[in-house]
Amino acid sequence: MANIDMSVIIPSKNNKNKAAEIIRGISKETKGLKTEFIVIDMDSTDNGVLSALNEIKKNNLKGCVIQSGGSTVASALNTGIYKAEGEYITFVYPDGLYKNYLLKYYNTLKEKDSDFVFSLCSEDYKKCIKKKIDGIDGIELILMLVRSFVNIDLGAVMIKRKFLLENNIRFYDDCVCGYSEAFIYNLLMCAPNISFIDDVLKKDVVNSVYNDTDVSNNSCFVKIDAILKVYETIMLCHRDEENLISVFEYLKIPSVIMSAVDILMKENFSCSAIKNSLRQKHYDDFLKISRKTPPKLRNKIIRWKFIPWFYKPN
């Protein structure tokens, strides 16, 4: 039995006193639980690390601050997972906070002996309220995610730590874009016992910190690579799941590639330059369509492949 009920992993970079404020707020919200706070500092240049550490010590809380240098957020989160001692793990982003949900998540996981819990974070609540999600199969939930019937925010989930460790589920360390989506897919493919909170979480707009992150154009290719790694796992471990394979081949992978095309075109890259890049990386091999490809995506792919001079990004 774990001595710690919940591990809260907070990736932080130059957030000033925000990490300390988050720790203070969550410690009040989860009063009565044994909660530990793991702040992963990614090469901050302000005093945020010191203020977070002082908050932990001042209130006699369980926790630590770990320096991860200039690593990716994905790598920092992996560090947090393996440092954690709690029965359950949750990730809290200073730039994407939600209000008062952790205690409800914890109680749900305990009562239902679940491995993973989430709730809806936007209007997609209305789309799937007619379908019972609690106890849904992991593969079914992936299909719903890919088809955009639901959305899962990594900053609003809770996971049994033992489940992650036993199934060796981790983030792709070198991934700067798309790491959270890939992580969720890989988790769901390991058949967790899933619980769903029938509620829409509210963003904590007042206390969130908004950072304008300047991401290189190559990040859109990194996201493609992350999804292709997930696809490799599917082909290795779930070859009998025809629906899962087809939805990745004819929907998910092509949509991510076309999203990258749109991003690059908006950055004024020429069609020929983009096509050369896709060809060199063999991404164009995955621009396939079938009857299962949504009409809008099918039209985008056809225009891009055969009449790129008429292609307009969304």
Image: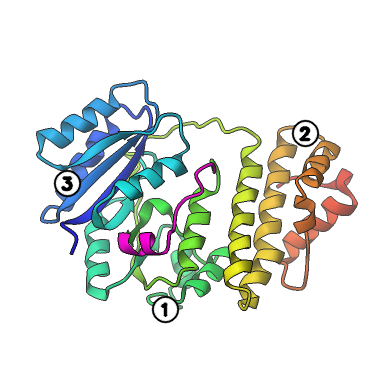
In the figure, is residue 215 to the left or right of 203? right
Q: Is residue 31 above or below residue 20?
A: below
* Residue 151 appearing in the image: no
In the displayed structure, 50 sits above or below 236; it is: above
Q: How many marks?
A: 3
Q: Residue at x 55, y 44 (%)?
A: 177
Q: Position of residue 16 (x, y in %)?
A: 31, 26
**In which image quadrant can residue 126 be found?**
bottom left
Residue 79 drawn at (x, y percent) = 37, 43
Range covered by the magenta-colored residues: 161-175
Which quadrant of the figure has residue 89? bottom left
Q: Earlier in the sequence, mark 2 or mark 1?
A: 1
Q: Which residue is mark 3?
A: 27
Which amino acid does the dot numbered 2 rest on? Phe
Task: List the residue tagged with mark 1.
Answer: 132
Q: Which mark is residue 269?
A: 2
142 on left or right of 191:
right
Any magenta on residue 172? yes
Give the spatial CA distance, label 2 vs label 3. 48 Å
C-alpha separation, residue under disc 2 versus residue under disc 1 = 45 Å
